[in-house]
Amino acid sequence: MSTHSELSTLSSSTESSRVQSVYVYQVPVRLWHWLTMLCMLTLIITGIFIGTPFITLPGNNMDALLMSYCRFAHFTAGYIFAIAFVGRLVWAFMGNEHARQLFLPPIWRGQWWSEVMFEFRWYFFLEDKPKKYIGHNPLALGMMFFCFVLGSLFMIATGFALYSEGAGPGHWSQIVFGWINPALGGSTNTHNLHRLVMWIMICFIMVHVYAAVREDIMSRQSIISSMISGHRTFKD
């Protein structure tokens, strides 16, 4: 098996044909992935409702408490999401090379960008055969870094900045993130940017799911099941 030093690619079809399964994603990475998925689903659903609440009729106690329940679920999921993200960042220093890959795309290397363009052509059906990667392919890695990693950092920062308004002076969120609202021109701007990035991440999720299913079928290498078993399996 031939492994590219930076891209973890199986470049030789002859050699890669001997590869059946490679252990890639360790247990903490897989647990973080699915926990983050649940948190993001909760945050998106409750966030949309908080931003544009449904009209409710007076006199129904459950309707009166609906926003409170949504806010509680949103804040709880936000805390879990942020703590899990920090834990994932810590594991990047403790885990294997694939645990670090998400946070260190080699954007300074020309060859990496060449591989990104190849993946673009593959996804647009302009290449006949895919390249095989043990970890993330370069395009997926770039999308996850710029859309998910940076997007998550922005959402955590602006989310806790908005949360700090209700928490009040002296709360840790006010001390750490309270400066963000004035820096962005007020909480309304922070809220609008928070929702804008939410929609960007929703688009990323849809593309991410499509690409994972597509690669499972067309590239004949496991993607979805790899986040369950931890093993990347090559079928050719």
Image (cartoon, grey):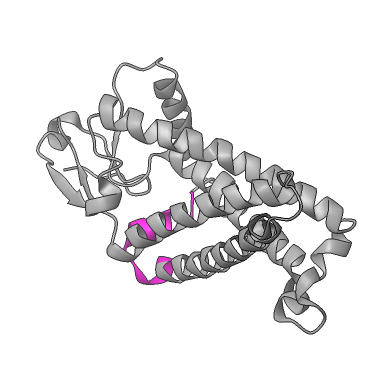
Q: Is residue 177 left or right of residue 185?
A: left
Residue 146, given in percent of the width and then of the height, sits at 58, 46
Q: Nearer the viewer, residue 132 or 112?
A: 132
Residue 9, given in percent of the width and then of the height, sits at 30, 40
Residue 102 covered by magenta stretch: yes
As drawn, 121 above or below 50: above
Quarter of the image where one finds residue 60: bottom right
Residue 64, given in percent of the width and then of the height, sits at 71, 58
Q: Which residues are magenta?
A: 92-105
Q: Is residue 23 left or right of residue 82?
A: left
As drawn, 218 above or below 67: above
Quarter of the image where one finds residue 34: bottom left
- Residue 57 can be seen, yes or no: yes
Quarter of the image where one finds residue 202: top right
| Residue found at the very far front of the displayed protein | 59
Residue 198 covered by magenta stretch: no
Q: Nearer the viewer, residue 79 or 27?
A: 79
Q: Is residue 23 left or right of residue 199?
A: left
As drawn, 219 above or below 8: above
Name the image quarter holding the N terminus.
top left
Name the image quarter holding the C terminus.
top left
Residue 111, given in percent of the width and then of the height, sits at 45, 37
Identify the residue at image location x=51%, y=42%: 142
Identify the residue at image location x=13%, y=41%: 19
